[in-house]
Amino acid sequence: MGEPVLALTCGEPAGIGPDLALMLAADPAPLPRRPVAIGDPALLAERARQLGLAVRLRELAPHEAPGPRVVGELAVWPVPLAVPVTAGRVDPANADYVLASLDLAIAACRDGRAQAMVTAPLHKGAIIEGGHPGFTGHTEYLRDACGVDEVVMMLATDAALHGRVLGEAQCPLRVALATTHLPLRQVPDAITAAGLTRVLRRLAAGLRRDFGLAAPRILVCGLNPHAGEDGHLGREEIEVITPTLEALRGEGLDLVGPLPADTLFTPRHLEGADAVLAMYHDQGLAVLKYAGFGRGANITLGLPLVRTSVDHGTALDLAGSGRADPGSLRVALALAAQMAEARARRPA
Ligand SMILES: NC(=O)c1ccc[n+]([C@@H]2O[C@H](COP(=O)([O-])OP(=O)(O)OC[C@H]3O[C@@H](n4cnc5c(N)ncnc54)[C@H](O)[C@@H]3O)[C@@H](O)[C@H]2O)c1
Ligand SMILES: N[C@H](C(=O)O)[C@H](O)COP(=O)(O)O
């Protein structure tokens, strides 16, 4: 395989996604060499003007591949907006535009035009209000679009991605989620033996395939305070999590837990671990974003294609201001290229 083509969806058009794509196009620092943005060229041109960035847009035909990256130029696979956009003001009328951009990236990965997709943030509320009431995020959308039964959302800090050790207070981290975009009230009922089994198998397989970890060690959080305090503060650990981990250890998975989530995320526990499985979104992601917000990436494990994303949202307050930090997008692009190259070397 030559250098991978990375399909970069620009996400919510009123958010910072278009800004970040343009900022990276203008940045002389090294980047994966064949990114192609997916979005509306008129929107990108207007945002470049607003940001004062001299970026030339090179519109490609649907089957045209981007050439090697040229600083100051952004290759684009065009998708037209439904309605014009003002930076910072979400309009649900553009929900289908956002999903069409995603669909194009998925199709490009599946038919070989791209070797990975990288997603700038979208606004879940805008998609839902724009006529897609069941929408909960890229992760679940990609799972359904690719027809797989289970995927795993994992976020990782830059240190974990590249094996560098940060300062003592910032442990390299990979955090995966047993449940993703679910109201908190529904979480306990969603922690089932069958669900946990699927997630842990997918997580271990993803760490093996995409991160080259032959026998990943996974720390598993409890759901309740102090992992249920022997059943006095909740019984999910005794009734569901512990028996599931025991069964999976019988398959050879290296699992530790369930551990109290408050102390699991400390350097002593994390030492030697390859990933943490948190039971719900904010149990894991609050810690990860504290450790490395803006320097991490979001990875969907278990897809037939490579997908990474930023570790932040649409930051509507910063769109068009020039104050958005492109650090996480840089990490997400680098990781996508690395994963695509690894898959080309070691097909599943
Ligand atoms: N990958 C994704 O598509 C993704 C990820 C997270 C959140 N979201 C969505 O984004 C929307 C807004 O979410 P939110 O407000 O909870 O989180 P947010 O990450 O958009 O913003 C939280 C804070 O971080 C700041 N921030 C975010 N990204 C930044 C950057 N690159 N540089 C500098 N500062 C940055 C924002 O200005 C804000 O103060 C929601 O609809 C949410 O669902 C999407
Ligand atoms: N849970 C993610 C985060 O907090 O960063 C985010 O909402 C993105 O999720 P998707 O990749 O599923 O859109």
Image (cartoon, helix red, strand yellow):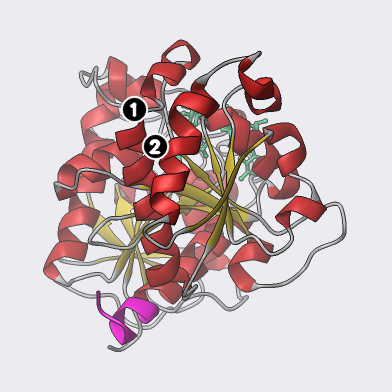
| Within-10-Å neighbours for mark 1: few <14, some 14–19, many 20+ | some
User: Which circle marks residue 6 in the picture?
Assistant: none
Considering the numbered disc 1 on the image, is that residue within a helix, a strand or a loop? loop
Residue 130 falls left or right of residue 61? right
Can residue 323 be seen? no
Specify the quarter for ligand 1.
top right
Residue 224 falls left or right of residue 78? right
Residue 111 is a magenta residue: no
Image quadrant assignment for residue 170:
bottom right
Give the residue displayed 21% in from the left and 64% down from the top: 109
Place of residue 67 in the rendered image (x, y in percent of width and height, measured from the top left): 31, 81
Give the residue type at disc 2. Pro
Q: Establish if 16 lies above or below 330.
A: above
Viewer-nearest of discs 1 and 2: 1
Place of residue 322 in the rendered image (x, y in percent of width and height, measured from the top left): 64, 46
Place of residue 222 in the rendered image (x, y in percent of width and height, measured from the top left): 59, 32
Along the line of sight, the residue nearer the viewer: 81 or 330: 330
Residue identifier under label 1: 136
Residue identifier under label 2: 13
* SS majority, magenta: helix
Q: Does the closest atom of ligand 2 sit within 8 Å of the Cβ of label 1?
A: yes
Image quadrant assignment for residue 61:
bottom left
Residue 314 falls left or right of residue 321? left
Along the line of sight, the residue nearer the viewer: 60 or 244: 244
